[in-house]
């Protein structure tokens, strides 16, 4: 109904000229050369339009005020699930409306607009009622006697550090020293000038460094580089606040931010990151007279072990084999994806994750609207740092096609295969419908609408059943010779990624990372000289630092991406021959509209590509391989092509805990291989528990989510004891056991 009304209004708009001066004047000149009274009135200004910018008009102020007030009232009142659902539906509706507006043409690129976006963000993300600053430190510091002891260095994860522009070229000057990643400047840039934002954020596909002269994106520095992502959405702020509450400040607490887009080797090549980190730690030790405690999160937990190999290497850090023992007291790892995560794989393969498959949120919809899957994959592949999180260890860790260590108990996984099949190919509903049409002898000659009706009925029938079972039987015969179209384990998916990406990305992976596993001591010692192995804990050994302690802390009890159902794009539609005699045919009109849209997309793609090596066709066409949203079986943990297991919502528990698990872990049971100094290792899981307050949008004090766990009160108390020099029991514990 809304679309019909919209079309009608457009027709009326086209029939009635917008400018009375143009309509009256043009009509009179066509009939006679003399001026009419209307022409004189138009010249006098009575018909003149208001030339003031729209944001200076009273009507705009009134509409914004009413809209924001209404949204604030609804947001404050949405404390029940029903009310929250209505509020989410309103957000989706507003997203649809906003997506149709030409924001680039009407929004100015000024600080005023940044402030507007920042204020509106506060209404959509109200501060949680139980999100109390400086807690729990203020409540326990006297009881436990907490006070500064060891100096602290914080190493954030991927996307946590803000990135700001230092370029002075003409295209960069308006962004000078503004955050291109993080803060509301990023949102304005993406919405209003996506191509320019992309030009700044992408990296050169060959060198992995700055894409062109004049563009310089660098990591923000200081404690505020990763405290908040945007106003109201904290990341490291809770950690910093609690340490400040027991006496820490910028003299003995440092945040080592970095450009997470870069490969680990390029962090040193371009930014001298590891040299600076080494100097920071050594200076802190001299100033405080004690060794340093390192706290890492997410990808930072991979960066730090790489750094330990770099700093000891004779050709790089020149620290010697005793550097870690002499300088590092404790390594606290929060949510570290040591074995990688499946989410990184699909992001690189087809530009998709669970977030893009479930387009219910405001931000996810806008991302999908403005960035196609191919555009996202092309951009992400230039960010070599993100590829460090691809799954490691192959079938030995992640499982074979028959069995995986984290498979559900037999009988509780429905018709689904083992998690070891990280990617399984299925037939989408659209393909199933096409197969039905062919089997029934129906083709495009049945007349207008006949084929569409049959397809619709078939799709409806297919939607009532799971498309994920018996995936191997669903592969089309024409794909039988395509070796890619089969079920893939963690070992073969890396090869699949190589085969479906550019030569530049292929070379980047080969020259920077390794995703295997070494079980031979001699080979592990050789790997100490191979920097491509340093980011893989399964191919390297921990340093000789027996007095250092390692704590692995992470959340559990949240559905987490573990495997996926994929399909192959079968877009082989026949071109319809159209000329003046049949242009009224619905198929010709649809084909013409598609061709016009294709031309528009090509122009946009030319601007987007820049230094990327991808061809225009690679960007504007849907990816050949994509997550199949028709595979949907929520009862057995499958939603829109994504299959879930236990974890922290981002990283599966298999990757979070394997190296630290006390009975069978890589650094414990297999310590002779990967931990020859037998460094004490503690594992602590924090079970995610929903907050009693509906206003705790970040999960509350018992959150186990990948990011929100940085505000988990029990975990904060645990690592504060380490920092303050207190002894802790070196054992495996669950949340609440200290």
Image (cartoon, grey):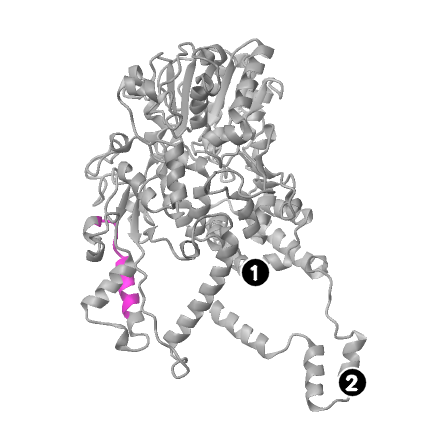
Q: Are marks 1 and 2 in contact (CB under 8 Å)?
A: no
Q: Which mark is residue 25?
A: none
Specify the quadrant that holds the C terminus: top left
Residue 30 versus residue 690: which sits nearer the camera?
Answer: 30
Residue 417 in sight in this render: yes
The secondary element bearing badge 2 is classed as helix
Residue 667 in sight in this render: no
Which residue is found at the position 50% from the left and 17% from the top? 293
CA distance for labels 1 and 2: 37 Å
Residue 289 locus on image (x, y percent): 57, 8
* 414 w.r.t. 540: above or below: below
Q: Is residue 366 magenta?
A: no
Residue 266 locus on image (x, y percent): 49, 32
Left or right of 418, for residue 170: right
Q: Which residues are magenta?
A: 454-471
Q: Which residue is mark 1?
A: 101
Task: Give the prevailing secondary structure in the magenta stretch.
Answer: helix
Which residue lies most toward the bottom here? 32
Left or right of 190, for residue 664: left
Residue 645 locus on image (x, y percent): 31, 37
* 230 w.r.t. 443: above or below: above
Q: Which residue is mark 2?
A: 37
Residue 460 locus on image (x, y percent): 29, 62
**Residues packed near mark 1 inside 10 Å, few (<14), some (14 to 19) or many (20 plus):** few
**Residues packed near mark 2 inside 10 Å, few (<14), some (14 to 19) or many (20 plus):** few
Residue 170 versus residue 645: which sits nearer the camera?
Answer: 170
Please count the marks in the image: 2
């Amino acid at each position: 109904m809304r679309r019909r009304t919209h079309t009608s209004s457009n027709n009326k708009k086209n029939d009635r000229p917008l400018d009375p001066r143009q309509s009256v004047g043009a009509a009179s000149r066509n009939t006679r050369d003399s001026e009419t009274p209307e022409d004189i009135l138009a010249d006098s200004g009575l018909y003149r339009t208001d030339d003031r910018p729209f944001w200076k008009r009273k009507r705009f102020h009134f509409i914004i005020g009413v809209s924001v007030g209404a949204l604030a009232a609804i947001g404050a009142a949405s404390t029940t699930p029903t009310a929250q659902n209505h509020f989410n539906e309103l957000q989706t509706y507003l997203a649809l409306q906003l997506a149709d507006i030409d924001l680039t043409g009407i929004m100015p690129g000024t600080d005023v607009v940044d402030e507007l976006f920042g204020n509106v963000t506060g209404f959509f993300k109200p501060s949680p009622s139980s999100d109390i600053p400086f807690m729990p430190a203020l409540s326990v510091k006297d009881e436990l006697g907490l006070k500064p002891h060891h100096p602290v260095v914080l190493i954030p994860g991927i996307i946590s550090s803000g990135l700001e522009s230092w370029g002075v070229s003409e295209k960069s000057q308006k962004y000078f020293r503004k955050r291109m990643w993080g803060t509301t400047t990023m949102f304005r840039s993406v919405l209003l000038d996506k191509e320019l934002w992309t030009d700044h954020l992408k990296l050169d596909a060959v060198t992995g460094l700055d894409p062109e002269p004049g563009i310089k994106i660098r990591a923000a520095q200081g404690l505020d580089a990763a405290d908040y992502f945007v106003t109201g959405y904290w990341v490291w702020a809770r950690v910093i606040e609690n340490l400040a509450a027991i006496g820490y400040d910028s003299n003995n607490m440092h945040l080592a931010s970095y450009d997470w887009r870069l490969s680990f080797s390029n962090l040193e090549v371009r930014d001298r990151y590891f040299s600076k980190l080494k100097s920071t730690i050594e200076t802190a030790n001299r100033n405080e007279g004690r060794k340093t405690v390192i706290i890492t999160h997410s990808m930072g937990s991979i960066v730090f072990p790489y750094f330990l190999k770099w700093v000891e290497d004779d050709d790089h850090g020149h620290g010697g084999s005793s550097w870690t023992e002499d300088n590092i007291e404790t390594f606290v790892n929060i949510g570290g994806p040591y074995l990688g995560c499946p989410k990184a794989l699909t992001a690189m393969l087809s530009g998709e994750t669970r977030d893009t498959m479930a387009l219910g949120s405001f931000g996810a919809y806008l991302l999908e609207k403005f960035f196609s899957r191919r555009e996202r994959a092309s951009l992400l592949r230039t960010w070599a740092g993100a590829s460090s999180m691809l799954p490691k260890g192959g079938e030995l860790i992640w499982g074979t096609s028959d069995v995986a260590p984290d498979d559900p108990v037999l009988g509780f996984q429905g018709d689904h295969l083992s998690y070891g099949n990280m990617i399984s190919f299925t037939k989408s509903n659209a393909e199933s419908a096409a197969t039905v049409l062919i089997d029934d002898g129906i083709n495009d000659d049945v007349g207008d609408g006949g084929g569409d009706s049959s397809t619709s009925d078939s799709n409806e029938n297919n939607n009532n059943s799971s498309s994920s079972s018996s995936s191997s039987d669903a592969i089309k015969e024409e794909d039988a010779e395509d070796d890619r179209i089969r079920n893939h384990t963690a070992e073969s998916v890396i090869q699949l990624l190589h085969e479906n990406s550019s030569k530049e990305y292929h070379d980047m992976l080969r020259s920077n990372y390794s995703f295997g596993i070494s079980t031979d001591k001699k080979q592990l010692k050789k790997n100490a000289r191979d920097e491509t192995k340093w980011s893989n804990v399964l191919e390297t050994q921990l340093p000789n630092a027996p007095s250092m302690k390692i704590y692995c802390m992470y959340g559990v009890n949240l559905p987490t991406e573990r495997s996926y159902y994929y399909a192959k794009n079968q877009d082989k539609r026949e071109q319809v021959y159209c000329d003046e005699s049949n242009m009224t045919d619905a198929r010709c009109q649809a084909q013409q509209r598609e061709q016009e849209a294709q031309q528009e997309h090509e122009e946009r793609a030319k601007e987007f590509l820049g230094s990327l090596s991808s061809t225009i066709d690679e960007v504007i066409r849907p990816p050949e391989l994509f997550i199949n949203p028709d595979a949907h079986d929520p009862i057995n943990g499958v939603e829109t092509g994504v299959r879930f297991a236990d974890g922290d919502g981002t990283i599966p528990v298999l990757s979070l805990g394997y190296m630290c698990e006390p009975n069978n872990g890589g650094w414990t049971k297999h310590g002779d291989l990967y931990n020859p100094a037998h460094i004490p290792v503690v594992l602590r899981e924090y079970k995610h528990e929903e907050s009693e307050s509906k206003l705790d949008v970040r999960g509350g004090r018992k959150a186990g989510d990948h990011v929100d766990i940085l505000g988990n009160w029990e975990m904060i108390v645990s690592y504060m004891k380490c920092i303050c020099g207190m002894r802790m029991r070196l054992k495996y514990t669950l949340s609440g056991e200290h």
